[in-house]
């Protein structure tokens, strides 16, 4: 993982800031040479994953995102506080979106809240 | 919804036509703006006697599952009333989501 190119974003955990998460994903992936379709898929995936975390967020929580290069693709990790320690539930539609747009995705919950790790590879050539 | 930031990100325009309400939606549909579209569609459907709503989605730059749920809810409401929701000229973003979720053949898409 190349820390020199990593981008970090921290925003209040409210839906109005999902746009920033998407914009950052688009810009980051564009700089790495992803195709237009791949960028759009990544934008959608980041949005869906963040929205899942926001559903569990409480007042004052922040959503922190890290965008990094892990050739041949990108890794996006998200963290957010949660109101309760209950396990995350990903609805079937969101799961279908994430499975179709990413190469790997994983959600987790721990004492600090909830998080995810997304991986998308750029197509060769 | 009185929110200048929402008006910039999402635009919803409702026009009465001879064939029923035509709703033009432009911008980005996500958890922040989906409620704005939901509210507009609720008002359209509450008017009564509506059996067909045409939703022009050509200007949708982004849509996620929250936006999709609004469309599905409106479709179900209309179908219960014996009517139909038509998605007109869906943008590439809309079509991509419909393909991912295998809904292209389950909705009326023009």
Image (cartoon, coloured by chain):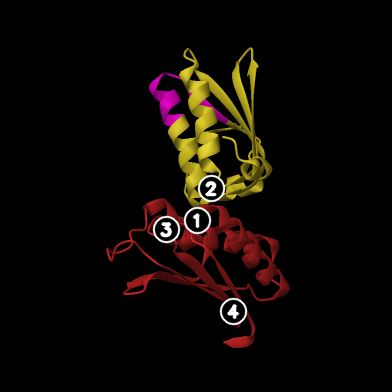
Chain colours: A red, B yellow
Q: Earlier in the sequence, mark 1 or mark 4?
A: 1
Q: Residue at x 56, y 29 (%)?
A: B86
Q: Which residue is mark 3?
A: A59
Nearer the observer, B87 or A113: A113
The Cα–Cα distance between marks 2 and 4, rounded to whole angstroms, is 26 Å
Q: Earlier in the sequence, mark 3 or mark 1?
A: 1
Query: Where is A96 relative to A70, above or below?
Result: above
| Residue range highlighted in magenta | B75-86
Q: Quadrant of the C terminus of chain A?
A: bottom right
The chain that hosts pointer 1 is: A
Question: Badge 2, how many Cα within 10 Å: few under 14, some, many 20+?
Answer: many
**Tags 1 and 4 touching, CB below 8 Å:** no
Question: Badge 4, how many Cα within 10 Å: few under 14, some, many 20+?
Answer: many
Query: Where is A14 relative to A123, above or below?
Result: above
The Cα–Cα distance between marks 1 and 4, rounded to whole angstroms, is 23 Å
Residue B32, numbered circle: 2
């Amino acid at each position: 993982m190349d820390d020199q190119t990593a981008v970090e974003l921290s925003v209040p955990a409210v839906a109005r800031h999902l746009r920033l998460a998407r914009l950052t994903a688009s810009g980051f992936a564009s700089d790495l040479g992803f195709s237009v379709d791949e960028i759009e898929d990544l934008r959608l995936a980041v949005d869906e994953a963040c929205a899942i975390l926001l559903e569990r967020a409480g007042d004052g929580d922040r959503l922190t995102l890290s965008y990094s290069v892990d050739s041949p693709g990108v890794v996006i990790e998200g963290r957010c506080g949660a109101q309760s320690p209950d396990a995350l539930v990903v609805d079937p539609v969101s799961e279908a979106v994430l499975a179709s747009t990413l190469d790997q995705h994983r959600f987790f919950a721990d004492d600090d809240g909830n998080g995810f790790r997304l991986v998308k590879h750029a197509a060769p050539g | 919804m009185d929110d200048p930031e929402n008006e910039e990100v999402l635009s919803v325009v409702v026009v009465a036509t001879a064939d029923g309400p035509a709703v033009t939606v432009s911008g980005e549909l996500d958890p922040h703006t989906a409620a704005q579209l939901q509210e507009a569609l609720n008002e359209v459907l509450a008017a009564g006697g509506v059996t067909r709503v045409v939703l022009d989605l050509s200007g949708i730059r982004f849509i996620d599952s929250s936006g999709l749920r609004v469309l599905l809810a409106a479709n179900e409401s209309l179908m219960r009333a014996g009517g139909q929701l038509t998605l007109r000229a869906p943008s590439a973003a809309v079509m991509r989501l419909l393909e991912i979720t295998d809904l292209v053949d389950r909705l009326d898409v023009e």
